Amino acid sequence: MDYSRNYTIEDIAQMEGHVEMISGHVLIIDKTSTTHNLAVSLIAQAVREHIRNKGGNCTVFTENVALYCNELSGGDQDNYFLPDVMTVCDPSSIDEDGVHAVPLFVAEITSESTRRFDYEDKMMVYRNIGVEEYWVVDIQKKVITKYLQSDDFVPEVYLHPEAVKVSVYPGLTIDVSEYMR
């Protein structure tokens, strides 16, 4: 990849692998760890089952599904993410190329190379586009940080949590103890 070149959202969308763009800068993520993948699966499955059991209409996506944040922020920032877990409740905004609406819930599982982006850059973008609930699941530090739009994205920090409630899905608590020991 030529890092001296400026890329567009269209360029990024056509690239192979896990490629994201934050404020116009390309961020390439290598493969994830097995723990990362298992944490993604656990959260996605818990949310998916809860939605199905409650008769909800939201769709749960994991990892390599694009979220076109630039469209959601008025196009003034080149942000293109592949959230680890996101729920989308507007079926008309889901295309083959990705999601073109604000997710209700997003969870990002950290890795050493993405931690700063998950806590800072992505958090600000998710806040600005209107995500209702955003989690940073830091499997290295054994911490979950939860941000709620209804609380002005003031962080709630859970150190070595056994389980964490999903605020946008009343009655859903996810057992995360396996990854937070």
Image (tube, grey):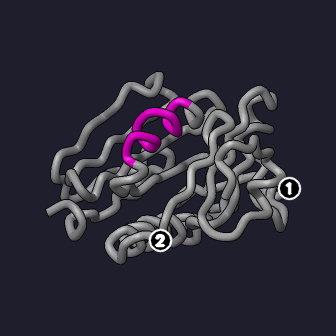
Q: Can residue 113 be spotted in the picture?
A: yes
Place of residue 43 in the rendered image (x, y in percent of width and height, measured from the top left): 42, 65
The answer for how far apart the CA atoms under marks 2 and 1 are is: 31 Å
Q: Amino acid at mark 2?
A: Lys
**Compared to 69, does 128 lie above or below?**
above
Neighbours of disc 2 within 10 Å: few (<14), some (14-19), many (20+): few
In which quadrant is the C terminus drawn? bottom left
Q: Who's the residue at 57% across and 66% down the image?
A: 62
Which is nearer the eye, 121 or 170? 121
Question: In the picture provided, is 161 more to the left or to the right than 1?
Answer: left
Place of residue 107 in the rendered image (x, y in percent of width and height, measured from the top left): 47, 53
Place of residue 36 in the rendered image (x, y in percent of width and height, measured from the top left): 37, 68
Residue matched to label 1: 92
Q: Who's the residue at 63% across and 47% down the image?
A: 26
Q: Main secondary structure of the magenta part?
A: helix
Residue matched to label 2: 31
Q: Who's the residue at 45% across and 53% down the image?
A: 108
Q: Amino acid at mark 1?
A: Ser
Q: Tell me the magenta residue range.
A: 115-124
**Compared to 94, does 36 lie above or below?**
below
Which is nearer the eye, 69 or 174? 69
Q: Who's the residue at 42% across and 50% down the image?
A: 114
The local secondary structure at tag 1 comes to helix
Magenta stretch holds residue 17: no
